[in-house]
Amino acid sequence: MNKRILVTGGAGFIGSHLCERLLNDGHDVLCMDNFFTGRKENIVHLMGDRGLELLRHDITQPILLEVDQIYNLACPASPIHYQYNPVKTIKTNIMGTLNMLGLAKRVRARILQASTSEVYGDPQVHPQREDYWGNVNPIGPRACYDEGKRCAETLMFSYHNQNNVDIRVVRIFNTYGPRMLEDDGRVVSNFIVQALGGKDITVYGDGSQTRSFCYIDDLVDALVKMMEQDGVIGPLNLGNPEEFTILELATRIKDITGSKSKLVYKPLPEDDPVQRQPDIELAIKELDWRPSVGIEDGLARTIDYFKKRLTK
Ligand code: NAD
Ligand code: UDP
């Protein structure tokens, strides 16, 4: 059935892919964004679609709308952007999520919160399962994001328990693909842009820290499955459990691009998690979902995108 769906952060990396998917499924999509890290370029190809409405709005401000579902994705996701104005990042996660929950409560919409693997901080349990409470520095440089997202989860569950709001909470692990910003500092986009430009590839620390990378199409598929099912409200991990060291990632990107770039080592940022890998048993069981795009294929598609974008 056709629904009216609000996507906050809809002009960002994940949000723009989600808007595209929901429009293709025949829904009416209200794409809301303050364009801090999002770009019209990400959604310009959707603007001819009669189902799309675009609204410039900051979720830290209340808003009255009539919708059936809300995907709350608004929040800068890369460390350089969420640390640019930490207080604003906290406001977006707390006041923004409160506003969206207030809206969900008033119109009885189902609301899905994009939480993050960062709620596990620098995890002492590996791989991370949903029942692990995490290891987060509450006053470190990543705290505005990590603690902001943790409090957003608390708000979601409090509105659910107290006001019966229909919630879904997913913890997203590192996701990559076309439409990442070339200069947002995240590792996949950094390494690809550096490799394609013949620049030094900047490995932070000794590159032995690990991450598990999920391709965007797999993630969007899981977000929609989570929203559409009635069995579980979360929190539920979403990611690709294939784990790599950052050094392995650099080498793969160098190989696929055929780049002659050198690897150079830079200081490891403070509180950078040592290892990260999602346990996705819950998603497999409840959503019948598992990622289908492997790292070689996903990187090749992302590299293709950046090749086109950088020559524009
Ligand atoms: P992104 O920066 O590309 O997208 C975020 C979008 O939110 C941008 O379009 C930005 O302009 C918008 N935004 C930021 N603050 C806003 C505000 N106050 N009001 C309205 N719009 C605002 O990042 P992304 O990678 O697409 O991440 C989307 C969501 O997924 C975020 O909530 C992020 O925390 C979460 N997430 C992403 C990843 C990942 O690997 N990409 C991992 C875990 C969680
Ligand atoms: N990283 C790196 N070089 C870069 C950018 C990032 O070695 O140019 C490392 C970073 O220190 C971290 C990992 O890659 O260990 C993932 O960083 P990203 O910012 O993409 O995601 P997050 O740390 O939030 O998981």
Image (cartoon, rainbow, N blue to C red):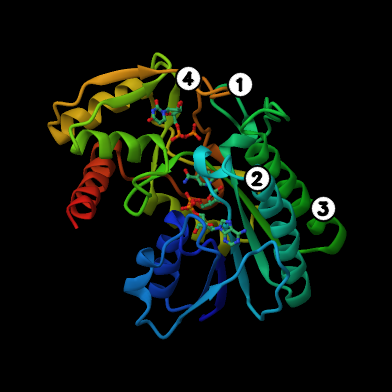
Which numbered marker is on residue 125?
1
Q: Residues within 10 Å of mark 3 (few under 14, many from 20)?
A: few
- Label 3 sits on residue: 158
Tag 3–tag 4 contact (CB < 8 Å): no
Closest to the observer: 215 or 192? Answer: 192
Q: Residue at x 80, y 58 (%)?
A: 159
Q: How many marks?
A: 4
Question: What is the spatial separation of the Cα atoms under label 3 and label 2, in whole angstroms?
Answer: 13 Å
At horizontal 54% and vertical 25% (from top left) the residue drawn is 127
Q: Position of residue 1 (x, y in %)?
A: 52, 80
Pointer 2 residue: 235
Task: Report the residue at 22% width, 50% height from top.
Answer: 310
Name which of mark 3 and mark 2 comes first in the sequence.
3
Which image quarter: residue 73? bottom right
- The reply to whether callout 1 and callout 3 are in contact (CB within 8 Å) is no
* Badge 2 amino acid: Pro
Give the quadrant of residue 104: bottom right
User: x, y percentage for residue 53?
Assistant: 49, 80
Q: Residue at x 38, y 73 (%)?
A: 24
Earlier in the chain: of badge 4 and badge 1, it is 1
Q: Residue 247's x, y, as percent?
A: 33, 20
Q: Which residue is mark 4?
A: 268
| Amino acid type for the residue under numbered disc 1 | Val
Element under disc 4: loop
User: From the viewer's perspective, is the residue at label 2 or at label 4 nearer?
Assistant: 4
> Does mark 4's beta carbon lie closer than 8 Å to ligand 2?
yes
Q: CA distance from mark 2 to mark 4?
A: 30 Å
Q: Residue furthest bottom?
A: 50
